[in-house]
Image (cartoon, rainbow, N blue to C red):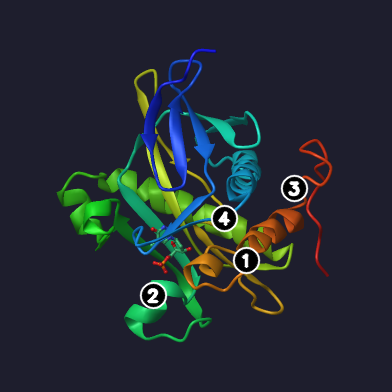
């Protein structure tokens, strides 16, 4: 079998050239890093779960008209996506104070924010992804004001939709990170959602107990990391119990 050409290896995924022009295969690894890769480890089964969770959420977003790069899942660890030009920004949305916001501004973790807050970080490992403002983004040409308008609109829609979807299965969407890319079709450019949406880049707390079900279990050495990711998949009704064909719909919490 011909080996596929590897395009890029990131901390949690490897990108390969796809079978058709304009497509890419995203391979989900079990590797986990935190604090700009100062902490490294593996979470057994994480790649399989993130591949499935991200597929599920991207499909639900497609259904409500949020353009994204997802085409289809290929197997347990790989999905086919459209090739996009990644905008070098990490777009973070926060609904509840946690993580760096809680630390930086001295706000008690768990405090509900008066409204959803969007933050931008410049995607640059060597600089440790510094926080930037709209001024930096437009001045340095990473995105135009028009691109940013689209990004904010899409981000707020994703936040509202995912907040409701997760609330329905007993999970609080505390915060999460999105990435966007430019997709050209004919001569038209569209901003689309890219990367992944999974417990690697969301904070997900049990609605009743506040228990963490995301990468903070790894970052903070809380144990039962894989179990947290599995519980998210189970509640969404997509934990493959008897193989990948056994997938139920979401389990509604009372
Ligand atoms: P933070 O509180 O550490 O700034 O993280 C905010 C959200 O962004 C949280 O859901 C985790 C996610 N995130 C990433 O996906 N990648 C990153 O490199 C960082 C720092 C955070």
* Disc sitting over residue 177 in the figure: none
User: Answer yes or no: do the residues labelled 2 and 3 have beta carbons within 8 Å?
Assistant: no
User: Answer yes or no: do the residues labelled 2 and 1 have beta carbons within 8 Å?
Assistant: no
How far, Cα to Cα, is label 1 from label 4? Answer: 13 Å
Could you tell me residue 151's position as x and y percent?
39, 48
How far, Cα to Cα, is label 2 from label 1? Answer: 19 Å
Which one is in front in this view, the residue at disc 4 or the one at disc 2?
4
| Residue matched to label 4 | 43
Q: Residue at x 57, y 33 (%)?
A: 79
Ligand 1 contact, mark 2 (Cβ < 8 Å) = yes
Residue 158 appears in the figure? yes
First-in-chain label (4 vs 2): 4
146 horizontally vs 80: left or right: left
Extreme residue toward the top, this view: 1
Quick one: 136 or 25, which is closer to the camera?
25
223 horizontally vs 252: left or right: left
User: Answer yes or no: do the residues labelled 1 and 4 have beta carbons within 8 Å?
Assistant: no
Could you tell me residue 60's position as x and y percent?
65, 44
How far, Cα to Cα, is label 4 from label 3? Answer: 19 Å
First-in-chain label (1 vs 4): 4
Give the image quarter of residue 212: bottom right
| Residue matched to label 2 | 101
Answer above or below: position of 209 versus 45.
Answer: below
């Amino acid at each position: 079998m011909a080996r596929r050409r590897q395009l890029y290896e990131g901390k949690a995924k490897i990108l390969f050239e796809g079978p058709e022009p304009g497509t890419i295969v995203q391979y989900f690894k079990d590797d986990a890093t935190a604090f700009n890769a100062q902490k490294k480890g593996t979470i057994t089964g994480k790649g399989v779960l993130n591949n499935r969770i991200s597929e599920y959420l991207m499909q639900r977003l497609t259904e409500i008209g949020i353009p994204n790069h997802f085409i289809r899942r290929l197997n347990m660890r790989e999905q086919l996506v459209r090739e996009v030009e990644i905008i070098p920004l990490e777009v973070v949305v926060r609904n509840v104070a946690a993580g760096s916001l809680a630390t930086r501004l001295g706000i008690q973790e768990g405090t509900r924010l008066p409204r959803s807050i969007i933050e931008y970080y410049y995607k640059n490992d060597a600089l440790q992804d510094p926080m930037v403002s709209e001024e930096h983004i437009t001045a340095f040409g990473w995105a135009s004001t028009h691109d940013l308008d689209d990004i904010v609109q899409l981000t707020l829609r994703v936040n509202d939709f995912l907040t409701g979807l997760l609330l329905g299965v007993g999970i609080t969407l505390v915060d999460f990170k999105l990435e966007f890319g430019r997709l050209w079709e004919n001569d038209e450019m569209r901003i689309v959602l890219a990367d992944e949406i999974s417990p690697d880049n969301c904070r997900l707390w049990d609605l009743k107990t506040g228990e963490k079900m995301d990468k903070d279990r790894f970052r903070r050495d809380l144990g039962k990391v894989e179990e947290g990711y599995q519980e998210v998949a189970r509640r969404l009704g997509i934990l493959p119990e008897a193989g990948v064909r056994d997938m139920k719909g979401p389990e509604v919490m009372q």
